[in-house]
Image (cartoon, rainbow, N blue to C red):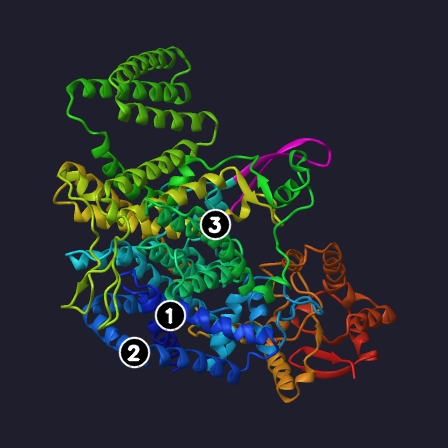
Amino acid sequence: MQTLIWLGLLEGLWLAMVPSAFLLFRWLPDRGFSVSPALGLLSGAYLTWLLASLGLTLSPLVCWAVTLGSFGLLNGWLLWRRKRALLKQLVAFGRARWRILLGSQVAFGICFGLLMLVRYYRPDIRNSEKFGNYTIYNSLLNNPAIPPPDLWFAGYPVNNYYFSHVMMAYLTRLSGIYPAVVYNLFLCTIFGLLGAGAFGLGYNLLGKTRRKWVGLAVGVLAVVFICFAGNLDSFRQLIAPNRHDIDYCRPGSTQCYWWTPARVIYDVRTVRNSQGIEQTVEQETINEFPAFSFLLGDVHPHIAALPFVLLAWTIILNLWHTPRPVFYRISRYNLASFGLSALILGTAIFLNSINYPTIFLPLAGALVWQTWRTGKPRWGRLGLYLAGLFLASLVVVAPFLLNFHSFAGQSGIPATLDYPLLRVIGKNIGLVQGSHTSLQDHLLIYGLFDYALVYFLALKLWPYCATGSKKVSRTSFVVLAGWVAVVGSQLLAQYGPPNLLPGVGLGLVGLGLLAVGLWRAARQRNKPVLLVSGWAGLVVAGFVLKVETLGLLLVALMTCALLLWYENRAQVPHQRLATVEPLTEVGAKADNEALADRSEGFVSTRPRVLNQTNPVRAIVAAAPDTFILFMVGFAALLLLTLEFFYVRDITDNRFNIGKFYIQIWLILGLAAAYACGRLWLAAGKVRLALFLPGAVGLVALLFCTLIYPVKAANVVTANFTTAKDLNGEAWLKRVYPGDYSAINWLHEQAARNPDKRGVLLELSAPDYTSDAGRISVFSGYPAVIGWPELEGQRHGFDPAQRAEVQRRYAQASGPIYKSDDRAKTEQFLRDLKVKYVYVGVLEHKLGASEAELAKFGQFMNLVYDHEGVQIYAFS
């Protein structure tokens, strides 16, 4: 019943946002229907948080009033104005595009249902960082203040990206469902929103085609690539396990198989120890992908933000296809578009700040493209628009920014950047000094997507490179033979016999062939051969510089840039303004860029491009291809940047590159799904010898990646034989029955009198695998200190707060319980305004004597003593 209430609530938010999305995403075939639930959740939670920041509380009454009032008034005005014109359009749209509407709902339902099945057998809010996430959520539920107090560092506010937790609290107040159940339902909701967004964006990328099922198939493939596929490392470890696999599969480990694919890249660097001796240090990095992250079950900010990243890319796609730049004139639509962009950018800071540049840059790039293709760009106006958008996005989350200190930044600044202005860069951006990503590791992570995209880009390049001259063909053959010989010589030198003569000889032959071939190509002005040879040189240079992906990423970036240039020039000038047409209001005059299709009541979305005579150019001429080239180019640029720079946080190495990698996964997954659809549409026009190998290889790679979700789901749920419940705190009743009863007693005290909720002392222990801190996590009572490493990260910006974390941990990790100094103990507790001292199972296991534990009763009242748990309180 709880699940049905939850789904009904989400469906209500979905439908409440449809009219607004229909108008805002007017240049997309699905009119924003697939991202409406994400936009509805974000809008409702944001308005509630904003009012809470001004003094209201996150009570059920406030949440329902904000939701019904805002959506009711907005939709009432939109649907009933102009003689209900929008309502009529929505009905016509639903009749014509029911497939995409149904497909989005099905995608959401499948993703939600499958993850709920996994969480049903593994619901525990335990291990990893679930405790840390739940503390923020529980603090929002039990405290009216914004920002919420830190339950694991009493007396201080939360210093974290907590908008995803606001969403959880918002849905909890609307649904009335128990918080420990909401945690799992919310995780399933995020996965469902990701699936619906992937399906809709995949469909929108391809646009409207004569074969409608192809667009739907691209949407389905996008869901498979983004939500369910693992990386190729999951297949690699089955056939060739390495030492890392063996370490994670040691006896008693619960991380065997499913964990290693998210730890593919290792940062290897040379450091000096305290004795000045150089040592090689190997540090794993995070290379997460959605299937792993949702099986892990942590509601991390960067995981909860994934559907909203797709929402941002949907906005960018809508801007890309807008016929006239949105900043050329002031209109209600342009102002609404500006507001929507500012809201998405602002809440990106609030959801996960590292997403801000990866959204703002492509959004700015789309506006640059939109301006350039007009033929009469107004760069000054564009600059003012982007500056205004940046400032507006900061204003949107001003209450958050006024109380938040970034995790990024280290005090040690490299000497080369220790100058005014550059110090900011040196403090927050680090230069990669260890090993770089190997080509093998890159392919293990993105190999499936790389295969589809390389095949697609190669076929798109072919018409620009192919000629009919036999002389040129011989030249191309000579150059190709030269490159094969050069590469072969390097392989012989590395893996061949000890005698270097074969490798040197083959290398000299290769260089000779290259010299002859390139000389002939230069005389014949054979630009394709010269260009491809230059790209091959970049690839070789990358291996020589030990940055193996450097050349390939540069080639991908240059390929996308050249194709964008060529395809923009290939369109008729007046056709550059519109590639996808909007719906127009019934009875209203069509815009100058719209061609009304009266039979359906809305405008055709067929792209207008030049007719091509070359068969292979069937996949070159499609206008939507330009956006895919833009996406792939941006992903290549981001990957290239991550090879040389990293964000300096508490780890001060490449550990957290996964927060970028998972966004790149979304981008490349969408682009690869689109590439498969375009190749299928061109299958009848491309030679079977070119098409068939690509299709077979893609199916084989997809099979290898789909092994992961099946096998990993069985591992994390112990073959679906573990707990059968969605209550994330039910494990306490099994493992710590005394603590479970004590937590319920604390809830009852706070329910009768909110003033009873006070600071609690309980055992603190190292992070991630310890059950210490469970009482404050599930009771909502603030603790003296929780996990020290996590709190040190959240409050590390201030040396005084960091020192306070260590001071509290030094006592709460055991000494305060073992101490026989009553006066010192009492003074410590009173200084921190402690109201309760908790002595439970873990505290008894510290080895303190009964006399040492009984000292609390000398100056405090024993208010609870049941099932081996004692709670002392100051009167």
Asked whether, in this view, residue 684 is left or right of residue 145, the answer is: left
Q: Quadrant of residue 755?
A: bottom right
Give, as a single range, the part of the protein colored magenta: 267-287
Give percent across and percent down for residue 743. Answer: 61, 78
Bin the neighbour count of mark 2 within 10 Å (Cα to Cα): few under 14, some 14-19, many 20 and up. Answer: some
Q: Are marks 3 and 2 in contact (CB under 8 Å)?
A: no
Q: Nearer the viewer, residue 357 or 583?
A: 583
Q: Any magenta on residue 623? A: no
Q: Is residue 206 above or below residue 73?
A: above
Does residue 732 show up? Answer: no
Give percent across and percent down for residue 341. Answer: 44, 60
Q: Quadrant of residue 315?
A: bottom left
**Residue linked to disc 1:** 37
Q: Nearer the viewer, residue 76 or 178?
A: 76
Asked whether, in this view, residue 860 is left or right of residue 190, the answer is: right
Q: Are marks 1 and 3 in contact (CB under 8 Å)?
A: no
Q: Tag 2: residue type?
A: Arg
Q: Give residue 383's mark.
A: 3
**Residue linked to disc 2:** 82
Q: Tag 3: residue type?
A: Gly
- Residue drawn at point x = 27 percent, y = 15 percent: 523
Give percent across and percent down for residue 242. Answer: 45, 40
Secondary structure predominantly adopted by residues drawn in magenta: strand
> In which quadrant will I find the N terminus?
bottom left
Q: Is residue 696 above or below residue 47?
A: above
Q: CA distance from mark 3 to mark 2?
A: 36 Å
